[in-house]
């Protein structure tokens, strides 16, 4: 026959496993609730920030005036022109096909 101590240990093991499973389920429910609460509070914070930035809050949005837009377009055009300009350097080749560092070496 099984000793009463082993039966008691078996019952305690089962109770321990059941309590761990219940704790895991409870933690999952709490985590789901916390995430949904965080989502709603984060959404409210983003909405209030956007409201402030678009003029409904303390800092109203002001569109740039035409002179600012023209200056921005001119600066952008100058930057694009400088980006598309490539200063080409011609490298001469020696008779054996290797590149030389100066033109004097070629002559």
Image (cartoon, rainbow, N blue to C red):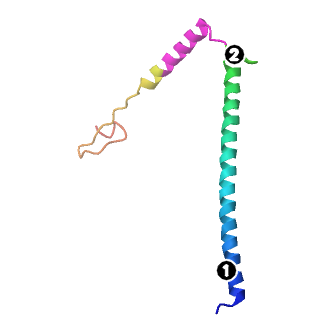
Q: Calculate the distance from the C-alpha at mark 2 to the C-alpha at mark 1.
A: 68 Å
Which range is magenta? Answer: 62-79
Q: Quadrant of the C terminus?
A: top left
| Image vertical order of residue 98 relative to residue 14, above or below | above
Residue 7 lies in the magenta-colored region? no
Residue 81 relative to residue 58: left or right: left
Does dot 2 land on a helix, a strand or a loop? loop
Q: Position of residue 39 (x, y in %)?
A: 66, 38
Q: Spot the residue most to the front.
A: 1
Q: Which residue is mark 2?
A: 55
56 or 36: which is nearer to us?
Answer: 36
81 or 16: which is nearer to us?
Answer: 16
Q: Earlier in the sequence, mark 2 or mark 1?
A: 1
70 or 17: which is nearer to us?
Answer: 17
64 or 13: which is nearer to us?
Answer: 13
Whether the residues at callouts 2 and 1 have beta carbons within 8 Å, the answer is no
Q: Position of residue 15 (x, y in %)?
A: 69, 72
Give the main secondary structure of the magenta stretch. Answer: helix
Give the residue drawn at x 56%, y 15%. 72
Q: Spot the residue most to the right.
A: 58
């Amino acid at each position: 026959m099984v000793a009463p101590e082993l039966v008691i240990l078996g019952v305690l093991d089962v109770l321990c496993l059941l309590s761990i499973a219940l704790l895991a389920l409870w933690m999952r429910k709490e985590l789901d609730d916390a995430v949904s609460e965080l989502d709603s509070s984060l959404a409210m914070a983003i909405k209030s920030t956007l409201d402030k930035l678009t003029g409904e809050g303390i800092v109203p949005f002001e569109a740039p005036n035409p002179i600012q837009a023209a200056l921005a377009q001119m600066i952008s055009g100058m930057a694009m022109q400088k980006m598309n300009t490539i200063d080409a350097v011609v490298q001469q080749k020696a008779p054996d096909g290797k590149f030389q560092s100066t033109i004097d070496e070629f002559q």
